[in-house]
Image: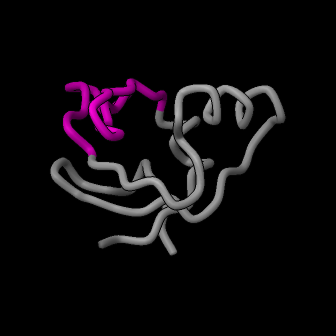
Amino acid sequence: MTTLDQLPVGGRAEVVALAGEPNLVQRFYELGLMEGERVEVVAVAPLGDPIEVRLGNSRLTLRRAEAAGVTVRVV
C-alpha cells in the first residue's frame, strides 16, 4: 500500500484507511475523505507542499504530513 502524499500528479487511488490524530481524522471525514472514496492528485506546489486532490466534485488542499496519514490503493 502507498500513501496519498506519494502519488504523482494525475495519480488516482481509492482511500483504504485514515490515520493520525483524532482531530485530523475527524476533519477528513467532515471534508468527505473517507474509506472507499476515490481521489486524484491534481497539483503539487512548487516546493512540494501542499498538494491538491480532487474528491468527487471538490478539490482539497492538504499538507504533505496530513496526506501521509491517508493510505490508498492505486487504481
The foreground one among 31 and 64 is: 31
The foreground one among 57 and 62 is: 57
* Outermost residue to the right: 22
The foreground one among 4 and 75 is: 75
x and y percentages locating residue 59 in the rendered image: 31, 27
Residue 60 forms part of the magenta stretch: yes
Considering the image in quadrants, where does the C terminus appear? Answer: bottom left
The answer to whether 32 appears left or right of 26 in the picture is left
Against 16, residue 37 (above or below) is above
Residue at screen point 59% across, 57% down? 35
Against 1, residue 57 (above or below) is above
Residue 4 forms part of the magenta stretch: no
Against 38, residue 29 (above or below) is above
Residue at screen point 43% across, 48% down? 5
x and y percentages locating residue 16 in the rendered image: 57, 65
The answer to whether 10 appears left or right of 71 in the picture is left
Against 32, residue 27 (above or below) is above
**Colouring:** one colour
x and y percentages locating residue 19 in the rendered image: 72, 50
Residue at screen point 27% across, 59% down? 12
* Outermost residue to the front: 57
Magenta stretch bounds: 41-63
Quarter of the image where one finds residue 28 = top right
Residue at screen point 51% across, 61% down? 36
The answer to whether 49 appears left or right of 17 in the picture is left
